[in-house]
Each structure stands twice: as structure tokens, then as C-alpha cells.
């Protein structure tokens, strides 16, 4: 059974920083990609940043230059460093991983709340 466990959300003032972490555990052969999505109240879930095992990292235009995604392959962990946070970054942030088990599957974490006050 595969699990994605997130940590690092919270409340921060505009202009501040937060770092999210997400560790994948369980039985899988490999990781094709890991990344972050977010969902604000009343809005659809949207891509924030994805880092594939091969290829270029992809960022939403709204976070380019402020957020940085990174991976520690030895720990099967993905991080999201969020700087210069804005109130519009307020959302539930979900970790996502595409993992190879007996098939290639799309997995989600439970979500972590990020609230940016003005």
C-alpha cells in the first residue's frame, strides 16, 4: 500500500515563507514524478509545481520566481519552498506522485492547509 504523507502547512503573513514536505512510503518500484497541486475554496484543483524523474520541472505561472520544488530521491520526498507568499496562495495543498507498482498509478496526499493573511 502506498502512502503520501505531507507536512509543513500553516498560517503565515503575506511576504512570509513556508516549506512543505511530502514523503512517499510503501511498496513501489519507481517514481515517475512528484509534485504539488492546490485547491482554494470554490475553485478547481490546480497544478503548482511538478518535478519529473526525467525532464524539466513545471511551475504554474502564478508561482514562478517565488516557489521552488525539489526532490530527495533517497528519501522519496518532495519539497515545496514557498517564498513571498500572497493571500491568493491560500489553499489546501496536495502532494501528488505518479508511482510504478504493478501498474502506473496517480497518488494523492491528504492535503495540508496553507493560509496567508494580508
Image (spheres, helix red, strand yellow):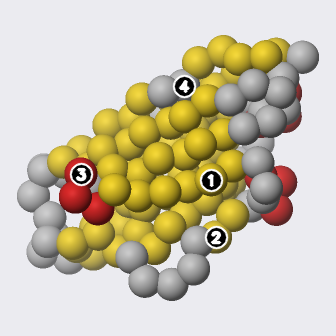
Label 2 neighbourhood size at 10 Å, few (<14), some (14-19), many (20+)?
A: some
Residue assigned mark 4: 9
Residue assigned mark 2: 58
Mark yes or no: residue 107 visible.
Answer: no
- Using the numbered discs, state the Cα–Cα distance from disc 4 to disc 3 in whole angstroms: 20 Å
Percent x, y of residue 35: 50, 57
Label 4 neighbourhood size at 10 Å, few (<14), some (14-19), many (20+)?
A: some
- Using the numbered discs, state the Cα–Cα distance from disc 2 to disc 3 in whole angstroms: 21 Å
Mark yes or no: residue 26 visible.
Answer: yes
Q: SS for tag 3? A: helix
Nearer to the camera, 2 or 70? 70
- Using the numbered discs, state the Cα–Cα distance from disc 1 to disc 3 in whole angstroms: 18 Å
Position of residue 65 relative to residue 81, above or below, is below
Q: Nearer the viewer, mark 1 or mark 4?
A: 1
Position of residue 2 relative to residue 88, above or below, is below
Label 1 neighbourhood size at 10 Å, few (<14), some (14-19), many (20+)?
A: some
Q: Horizontal placement of 11 versus 42: left or right?
A: left
Mark sitting earlier along the chain (4/3):
4
| Residue at x-position 55% and y-position 64% | 50
Mark sitting earlier along the chain (1/4):
4
Amino acid at each position: 500500500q502506498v502512502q503520501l504523507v505531507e507536512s509543513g502547512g500553516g498560517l503565515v503573513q503575506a511576504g512570509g515563507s513556508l516549506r512543505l514536505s511530502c514523503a512517499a512510503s510503501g511498496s513501489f518500484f519507481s517514481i515517475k514524478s512528484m509534485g504539488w497541486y492546490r485547491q482554494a475554496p470554490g475553485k478547481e484543483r490546480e497544478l503548482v509545481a511538478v518535478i519529473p524523474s526525467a525532464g524539466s520541472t513545471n511551475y504554474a505561472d502564478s508561482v514562478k520566481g517565488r516557489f521552488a520544488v525539489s526532490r530527495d530521491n533517497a528519501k522519496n520526498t518532495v519539497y515545496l519552498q514557498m517564498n513571498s507568499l500572497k493571500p491568493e496562495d491560500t489553499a489546501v495543498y496536495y502532494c501528488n506522485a505518479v508511482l510504478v507498482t504493478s501498474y502506473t498509478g496517480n497518488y494523492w496526499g491528504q492535503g495540508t492547509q496553507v493560509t496567508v493573511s494580508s
